[in-house]
Image (tube, grey):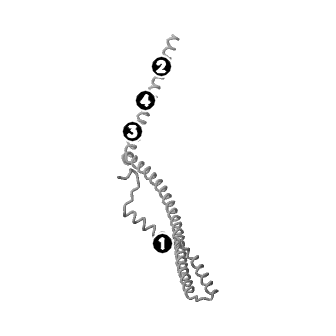
Amino acid sequence: MPPKPGALVITEEEEEIIRQRIIEQTATLRPGQPYPLKRLVGAFFDLVATLDAEEDAEEAKEAFYTELDTYEFNMGRYSSVVAAQRLQQLGYDDEEEALRAKTAELLSKSASIRTKLAESARERAFREARDETVAACREQPPRADSEATNAELERAIADARAHIESLDADVAERKAKYALLLTALDQIEDGRAAA
């Protein structure tokens, strides 16, 4: 019968891997067996009972020494694991301190880079304004042409002033002639009126 859709299907290889992991996990303490310290205490009480009964205690001594050696070996193994973990923790602490220092250094560099970026933005704005000014100046005629044009305009102004002065002199002369003419007319009319 085919498996139902969504049902968990375990292959033989996966089943073997699961079985092996279960064996590895339960190998340290098999079901029904006492803990190492309980076995050591049990061997010690067996030794004491044998000594109290004044029987041959060689077998009990051997069993106690074996349990004691096993317990000591396990404790040595556990203490070496704990020591290794402590060393590893110290290494982690050193790495964490190094990371903090590196982080502080990177934050300092970041602040420095931000400052330089702001300065470069100001400098870029200055350069752009300068370039715009230079471009505007390039659109203007050269100084020599401007000075020549100014000199020409000053000559034209001077000529215009001279012409205006000559016209003013002509107008003043004509005013004087006109005033003289009016005076002569007034005298002629006064002479007719008297005659």
Mark 3 or mark 4, earlier in chain:
3
Examine the rendered structure and indicate whether residue 86 appears above or below residue 145: below
Whole-percent x, y for residue 48 in the image: 62, 84
Crowd rating for badge 3 (residues with CA inside 10 Å; few <14, some 14–19, many 20+) = few
* Secondary structure found at label 1: loop
* Secondary structure found at label 2: helix
Determine the CA span between mark 3 and mark 4: 21 Å
Mark 3 or mark 2, earlier in chain:
3
Q: Amino acid at mark 1?
A: Ala
Q: Amino acid at mark 2?
A: Ala
Q: Which residue is mark 3?
A: 156
Q: Which mark is residue 170?
A: 4
Front in this rendered view, residue 110 or 95: 95
Crowd rating for badge 4 (residues with CA inside 10 Å; few <14, some 14–19, many 20+) = few
Mark 4 or mark 2, earlier in chain:
4
Residue at image position (61%, 81%) is 45
- From the viewer's perspective, is the residue at label 1 or at label 2 nearer? 1
- Residue 20 position by quadrant: bottom left
Determine the CA span between mark 3 and mark 1: 118 Å
Q: Which mark is residue 27?
A: 1
Q: Amino acid at mark 3?
A: Ala
Whole-percent x, y for residue 39 in the image: 57, 77
Front in this rendered view, residue 173 or 54: 54
Mark 3 or mark 1, earlier in chain:
1
Whole-percent x, y for residue 155 in the image: 39, 41
